[in-house]
Structures are given as structure tokens and as C-alpha cells.
Image (tube, rainbow, N blue to C red):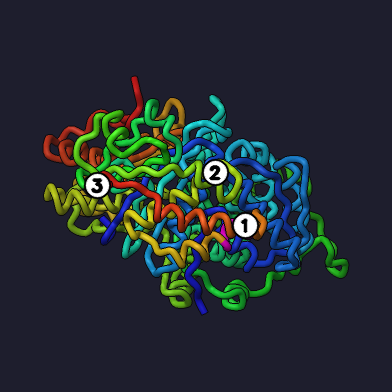
Amino acid sequence: MSEGLLEIRWHGRGGQGAKTAAAMVAEVAMEAGKYAQAAPEYGAEREGAPIKAYTRIAQDLIRVHDAIYYPDIVVVLDDTLLDTQQVDSGLSEDGILLVNTRKSPAEVRELLGLEGRRVYTIDATSIALDEIGRPIPNTVMIGALLAVTGVVDLEHIEKSIDKKLGGKLSEGMLKGNKRAVERAAEEVRGEDG
Amino acid sequence: MSERMALTGNDSAAYALKQINPDVVAAYPITPQTELMHKFAAYVADGDVKTEFVTVESEHSAMSAVVGASLAGARTCTATSANGLALMWEILYIAASCRCPIVMPVINRALSGPINIHCDHSDTMGARDAGWIQLYSENCQEAYDNTIQAVRIAEHPDVRLPVMVCLDGFILSHTLESLETSDDQTVQNFIGEFERPDNLLNVDHAETFGAFALQNYYFEFKKQQADAMVNAVAVVQGIGSEYGTLTGRPYDLLEPYRCDDADVVLVGLGSTMGTAKQAADDLREEEGLKCGVLKVRCFRPFPGEQLCQALKDVPMVGVMDRAISFGLGGPLFHEVRSARYDAAGPMMNFIYGLGGRDLSLDDAGEVFRTLARAGESGRAEPTVSYVGVRE
């Protein structure tokens, strides 16, 4: 495998920004001098339909072009997917599951019957509504991912928000997204607290 | 100066087109090619290119418009996918026979039906006899590099044929990767000026193009096209090598990977070859299986001689086809086997990934193991099998 390969699988619904989040994390890693790949898994695109997206980060060239079956990290943008999608499929023994939900990590663990791994939760939808006025949790989840794993750093994420969303959103919305990222780092919950 | 950029396959081909700065581009949108032309249209609107961008009402018209522009002496490009390529069918042959050096990224997608927007090679495989050169790309870097080289190959005086730059739909077109790009001037210097002295607008030497040719002349036109394809072999190699000197990324007709001591080798096209290389490394390390990969970059002209050379000491060869020639098997398999007729060892054909069905690293590993078992038992059966299909 490519050296230091890290594989992230994103589960969301069309419109929640899973594709954009997967790409932002990859771009940020590339800007930090790493190799990365980001790919959405499209069905017939439509709002609300379950979708997956993938991010790979490594120290050298990534050659594989398949789906991610054995992720190191799974990010779930919508907790209604916990009942219908096998979000923990193939998640490595010391892998991380990060879920946008009001539930606690212990409740998610029980719901999935999950053993091992590390579970984190965050109420990203509420933060998104507070800060950007829309229930689009993707940048919040990037903030949480950053806090939990350190795969990317805050400064690069903020630059990426300007670059990726700058053409689409107002200045206020951009600032809101940045605040959402920062709040995520504070509000993400692990199993020890 | 080179720059590392984060681009999808569509963006990388669009960026190459921007740097090529064609005189005329005519295009019609189709998934998954649409974003490529969105991006290029933005370059036009922003004044980054001087291209005359013609929005037409169909792919048949897109190809017709670039044929006309090419015959008028313009450097021309377009891009399409799947059913769009199918709608160009009639004009593909005319583009090749009028010796129009059109460059066309084709974002590989399954042909209907059932309707499907995802990757396989049924679109370009169907067009393999249209007289176009076909280059296949493993990743976004190659999509960029192949698009630039395609201009030189197409316009080379010994060739003067249109080129399809094939890249896998979604798997590359919508996947963000890190790639190295050259600056605009370097690309311009590499491709040079396009000159077609015999053109429709040269009133001092008025000529007729696309004329009627019956029993007395048609055959000679076809022989010239066939000769141009033969010439293209050395031209593709020469330009790939020159591009390597310029960028540090040399290209050839084929790319052998760990074939020298291999017991089993998989031959194939496109993005799956990256996955196969990884599987070959993994199986060598974890299971002691001596696996290799032979990537066919240039499918037309078909590099039979070079392919036989690369496979000459390989006991067991498998060919991965992402298309079916119904009633025959995989088209690449049959061409590889035909090329190796005089030196044939046993071969197996694996049909995979139709309509975007994922070919996982595990799948690639299992194909290598199947080949290894066939090599040990001496029974390469069944000749054609289907990877990951439900019966």
C-alpha cells in the first residue's frame, strides 16, 4: 500500500455536502504536501438519497481506484443512516466512527452492536443551523474530524473553505462555516466524556 | 515551471485544453463529461482562451462542426461520453478519413441499456474501428498528459488522424487527485503551431474535401488511413519520450510493471491498472505470487509487437476487459491473443466492471490467484469469466 495510507469513508444524504467534505479534506492534505484522492460514489444523484464518498491520504502516490472497503475512519453525516446503511462495514479494529447525532457515543455503539473501535458524536446539524442557518453539517464534521484525528489542520481548513465555497456563499456564510469548524472541535464527544 | 494541483479527471482534461488553447471547440453536454465542458466554457467566458466555442444541439453536430473547422485549418477539440459518442458515430469515420487531427477526451461510460451513467469501455471499444487513435489514462495525471501529447500525435505529418483520450467515467472524471501541470508557455512550446496548408480557406490552392469516391478511389483512401495508423506507432513512442524529457514523465505504447520475473501478468486498460499494480505488490509480498501488470496505454494503433515482447517470458497471461463483444468475449483479450498467436501460451479473459461495478483490490488479487492456479494446473479454463457478477 501507499506509505502511511489513511482511508476515510463518508456516509451522508444527497445535499448534506459529503462529496464536498471528502474533496476538502483531500485538498487540504494535498496543500500540506501529501498525496490524496477524493471520490464520490454516485447513484442517480438526488437530494436525500444515501451516498458515500471517499478520501484517501498518503505520503506517496495513491494507485488504487476502487471504493474504500476497509476504512480507518468513517464519518456519518446523518444518523438516520445508522439504521439502513452498514456504516461500520470493514472499519478497522482501531478505527474511528464519527457520527452527526444528538445521541451519545455509548448510544451509537449500542445501536450498532459495535465492539472495539472508537466512537465520537457531535450534534453537527444544530451547530450548522446556529452558525450558517442551514442544516448542512459537512464543515462541522470536518471540524470534528480535525479535532479527533488531526489528519488536517485548522488553518488549512479555513483556507479551503474560502477557496471551495468562496464563489458560492456570502461573506457571512463563510464566517459562519469557519465558526462551525471551531465549535465542532470544542463540542465533539468521545467515550470518556 | 511546473505546479502541483488538485484536480479531478474532468478538470485535468479541461485544464489541458485551456493550455492547448484550440481555435475551435464544439461540444454538447453528457454525464460524466459535462463538468469538463463547464470548466472549459468558463475559461472561454473568462477570456483565458481565444477559442471559438460552439454550443451545438447534439453530439452529431459537435463532431460535424469540428470536422468543418478542422478542414478550414483550425486546431479543434471536443469531448463526450457513451451515448454521445454513439451519436457521433457517422462523423467519427468522416473525421478520420478526412484526416482531421481532432483531439477528443472521451469520459468512458457504459452504453445503454439499461441506462447507466457509470464507467465501462463499451463506448470507445465500439469505436475502435473508426480510424481514431485511442490512448487510455490510468489516473488524472495521465488524462492531463495524454491530452497534451494527443495534439502532437494527431497533427504529426506522418499521422494526421484524430485521437481519443480515454479516461474512466467517475472513477477518474469525478475523482480529485494530485497532479503536476506544466505552465501554459511550456505546453504551447511543446505542441507548437498547427498548420494545415491544404485547407478550405486557402483560396490560392483550392481543394475539395470529403468528395465522392467510388470503386476507383475509396480503397486508396482507406489504405492511406491504415498506413497512417502504422506510422502512428513510432510517433506515439517518439512524442511520449520527448514529453518525458520535458516533464520527467515519459510515455510509451505500453507500461509493463514487474513483468520481468512474473509468473502471471494481467493486461488491461485505464484506472483499474493502478489497482492491479497495488494488488500485484501485495500478493508478491504477502503470498509470494510473482504478479505483474501490463498496461496498454495505446490501444489504437494496437502495439502487438511490443506486447509480445513484453509478455514473451510470461507463463500465464490474463486480460481484463471492461467491455463485451457479444458472442465473442472481451475485445482486448481477442486482440492480445491474436497478436500472440505465434508465441502463444495459455491465456484467460476476465470481464469486469461493466456499468461502473467496482473492481476492488480484493477482486484484483483473486484474479491473480485464479491465473496462478491455472498456471500450476496447466488448465486455463474457462477462457472467459466474469468478475463480481451475480448469476
Numbered disc 3: secondary structure: loop
Which numbered disc, 3 or 1, marks the residue closer to the eye?
A: 3
> In the image, what residue type sits under mark 3?
Asp
Name the chain under label 3.
Answer: A
Q: How far apart are marks 3 and 1 (CA)?
A: 59 Å
Name the chain under label 1.
Answer: B
- Same chain shared by disc 1 and disc 2: no
From the top left corner, tell me how far across and down residue A13 is, in percent: 50, 36
**Does residue B249 appear in the picture of this structure?**
yes
Q: Which residue is the site of mark 1?
A: B103
Q: Are marks 3 and 2 in contact (CB under 8 Å)?
A: no
Q: Which residue is the site of mark 3?
A: A192
The residue shown at (49%, 47%) is A138
Q: In this view, does B129 lie to the left or right of B350?
A: right
From the top left corner, tell me how far across and down residue B324 is, in percent: 44, 32
Numbered disc 2: secondary structure: loop
Residue B159 falls in image quadrant: bottom right
Write down the region rendered in magenta: A162-166
Who is closer to the viewer here, B84 or B267?
Answer: B84
Q: Distance between the residues labelled 3 and 2?
A: 27 Å
Name the chain under label 2.
Answer: A
Q: Distance between the residues labelled 1 and 2?
A: 40 Å
Q: Are marks 1 and 2 in contact (CB under 8 Å)?
A: no
Q: Is residue B97 above or below residue B22?
A: above
From the top left corner, tell me how far across and down residue B36 is, in percent: 61, 52
Numbered disc 1: secondary structure: strand
The residue shown at (39%, 69%) is A33
> In the image, what residue type sits under mark 2?
Ile
Disc on res. A136: 2
